[in-house]
Image: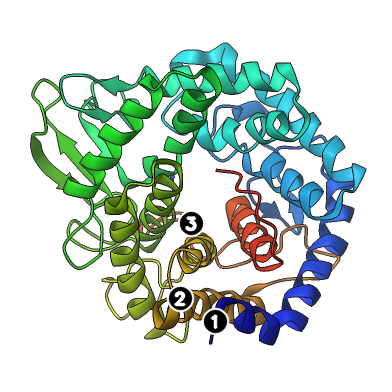
Amino acid sequence: MGYKSIIDKNREWIDEVWNKLDEKLSRTAVKSRYKIPYTTVNGEHDDHKDTINKWTNGFWGGLMWLMYIGTGKECYKLTAEESECMLDKAFGKMAKLHHDVGFLWHITSGVDYRLTGNEDSKNRTLIAAMCLAGRYNVEGNFIRAWNAMWQGEDTTGWTIIDTMMNLPLLYWASGELGDDRFKYIAVRHADMAMRDHVRKDGSVNHIVVHDPTKPDTVLGTRAGQGYSEGSCWSRGDAWALYGFAISYIHTHEERYLETSKKVADYFIAETEKTGWLPRLDFRQPETPVYYDSTAGAIAACGLIELAKFSEGKEQEKYLSAAINILQTMEKNWCDWSETEDSILQMGSLMYEREQHMPIIYGDYFFAEAILKLKGNEFLPW
Ligand code: GLY
């Protein structure tokens, strides 16, 4: 079956879910307008205004822009603009910024600028791009991920697979300024991730430790948010799947498309084993059974993009897998009630703690995937 036939077959479900998203989010857009939510407590969005540099703080504003793009409703735009202004405080704590400036600004001020031409939004997004470019290690050819989490910790040589999703900020900055230096950094980092993070079978290393003083030198790997070193954290796999697809869209380099497909094939095979509900780590012990809905939502976005760049059976495989994941998660894990502010439940931060809870980026990527299935071509990344 071709792309259009698969969409047509599922059209009723896609429209129904989109309407449920709009019904619920048009309410919470007003209710949580002055918050920066991460999760919910007793059904109510929490608020991270006081931890403004947290990497997840762009997803609420980003979600509001997605809904504005899909509906044109003012309530979403107002909340997105409010969120963007609140994020300005994070620029006041530059030393606390990290590689996730793409998650913070590319999908908030970056989308605002692309939709409205707002010059303040363009400025915010350029500052974010410069922060990310400033984390590039010119000796090692990689972007440093995190700052030290405790005094004396040395993370100068650490890269993480998640950074793939921040590279679009650099591609955008190069296009905007007509200057490829940002893109050079993105491409060097993507090539490193392809070589050092993605394994032959399409699973990924979450953290790779490099020698920060020598080119392309790996010192080791770390478990990160998955089960253990050598395991495969499903959200990390999803970041790679979607991240390499996006790098392909921006650079047209076939090697990124091939890498994304390799990761996608592994993700699909592993997720199909558990009835399309992704486990937290594909190599975790049989018990306890931890899941992560956010991995499913991120992967679905990537799979839909991959389907657009494939043909025949391969196209059917990617699009059907995306729909299977989304439909199964919608049936089992979505809360459409009025007493709960979040939608997608069963997200997990990491193997060691905070499993099975709503997390704002689960809602963000779930909505992005449904918007794509509705045929909207706007790529926030
Ligand atoms: N980027 C951190 C995470 O995915 O949890």
| 163 in relation to 53, above or below | below
Residue at figure coordinates x 37%, y 63% from the top left? 234
Quickly name the residue at label 3. Answer: 354
How many other residues sit within 10 Å of disc 2, few (<14), some (14-19) or many (≥20)? Answer: many
Pointer 1 or 2: first along the chain: 1
**Residue 381 screen position, x and y as percent:** 55, 43
Q: Position of residue 301 (x, y in %)?
A: 53, 61
Q: Nearer the viewer, mark 1 or mark 3?
A: 1
Instruction: Give the structural element (helix, strand or loop) at label 2.
Output: helix
Of mark 2 and mark 3, the one earlier in the sequence is: 2
Please report the residue visible at 39 percent of the width from the left and 49 percent of the height from the top: 248
Return the x and y of residue 314 as percentages of the image width and height: 40, 78
Q: CA distance from mark 2 to mark 3?
A: 35 Å
Left or right: where 244 falls relative to 31: left
Task: Give the number of the disc on residue 208.
Answer: none
How many angstroms separate mark 1 from mark 3 (CA)? Answer: 40 Å
- Nearer the camera: disc 2 or disc 3: 2
| Sequence order check, earlier mark of 1 and 3 | 1
- Residue 43 visible to an observer of this rendering: yes
Q: Are there few (<14), some (14-19), or many (20+) residues within 10 Å of tag 3? A: few
**Left or right of residue 29: residue 318:** left
Residue occupying image coordinates x 42% and y 36%? 167
> Which element is circle 1 on?
loop
Q: Nearer the viewer, residue 40 or 343?
A: 343
Disc 2 Cβ-to-ligand 1 distance below 8 Å: no
Q: Which mark is residue 315?
A: 2
| Contact check, label 1 and label 2, Cβ < 8 Å | yes
Label 2 sits on what residue type?
Gln
Residue 9 drawn above or below residue 258? below
Which residue was labeled with disc 1?
2
Mark 3 element type: loop
For the question of whether residue 149 can be seen, the reply is: no
